[in-house]
Amino acid sequence: MEAEIGIIGGTGMYDPGALEGATEAEIETEYGSPSGPVVLGTLRGRRVAFLPRHGRGHTIAPHEINYRANIAAMRSLGVSRIIAPSAVGSLREELGPGRFVVPDQFVDMTRTRRGTFSGGGSVSHVSMADPFCPEARAAALSAAGGAGLGVTDGGTYICIEGPRFSTRAESRLFRAAGADIIGMTLVPECQLAREARICYVTVASVTDYDAWKGEAVTAREVRSTLERNAAGAREIVARTVEGMPAERRCSCASSMDDADI
Ligand SMILES: [Zn+2]
């Protein structure tokens, strides 16, 4: 095992910060190349593997990310848990910019992505009723609380295709449908991790109010809020790594045991 915990950095997080003994690995998978070289090292006493989802220069659009290669690369390193920071818009007044959310559900509105390792003769129907690892969620929530950062436990992340932002009508529709935050990258990353028997949690950093409230979001607004939130996001990731239980008592490792019909 080269790494125990994977970190897939989102918009605004392109390097892992200070890792002890950091080395880089170029990994090729049967699904192609991941978003870039993986940085391996030690963070707060744990072996981690860091990969920036959009590439180091933010050159890979949400719909172009090779999610399967990213998860397969993590799996090949022995990763059993993934912490996935991400930037999101808010669909709720009370989830203002600067707030962190650890969602417990998602709705998939993507259209063009390869969302499964299944196929080519093997058919698996994995359960996604509870898409996130309860142990990893608990570690992330306690990390955010311990760092004194405003965090919301639970919520529904609606994943859109992007890379454009929502129309006002879409934003209102998603609100009416009960979604709380909106982003472009959770799916299929989350479900591929489940298929790979890897625990997965996302720590969403709210950057804006999407398009339902007043001024519609711009990429510039997203960037400036992320810059303000960057230190907090890094601290949550580091503390989540530190607080992740060494032994898995969740059912993520057996996710595929009942997936074949
Ligand atoms: Zn788990």
Image (tube, rainbow, N blue to C red):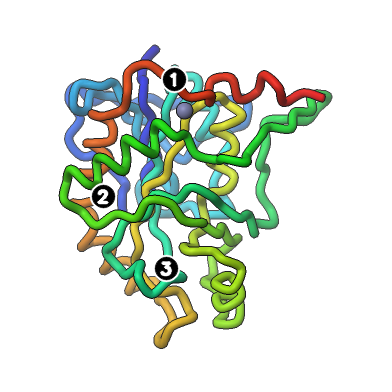
**Amino acid type shown at disc 3:** Ser
Q: Relative to the observer, which residue lies in front, 133 or 228?
A: 133
Which one is earlier in the sequence, the residue at label 3 or at label 1? 3
Q: What residue type is labelled 1?
A: Arg
- Counting from the top left corner in percent of width and height, residue 248 is at 42, 19
> Marks 2 and 1, Cα distance to the nearest angstrom?
26 Å
The residue labelled by disc 1 is 249
- Rounded to the nearest angstrom, the CA distance separating label 3 from label 1 is 32 Å
Question: Neighbour class for label 2 at 10 Å: few (<14), some, many (≥20)?
Answer: many
As drawn, 32 above or below 93 = above
Residue at the (60%, 55%) spot, across then down: 107
Q: Which of marks 2 and 1 is in front?
A: 1
For image coordinates 23% across by 58% down, the residue present is: 229
Q: Where is residue 222 in the image (x, y as percent from the top left)?
A: 35, 68
Return the disc, 2 or 1, that comes first in the chain's sequence.
2
Disc 2 designates what residue? Answer: 233
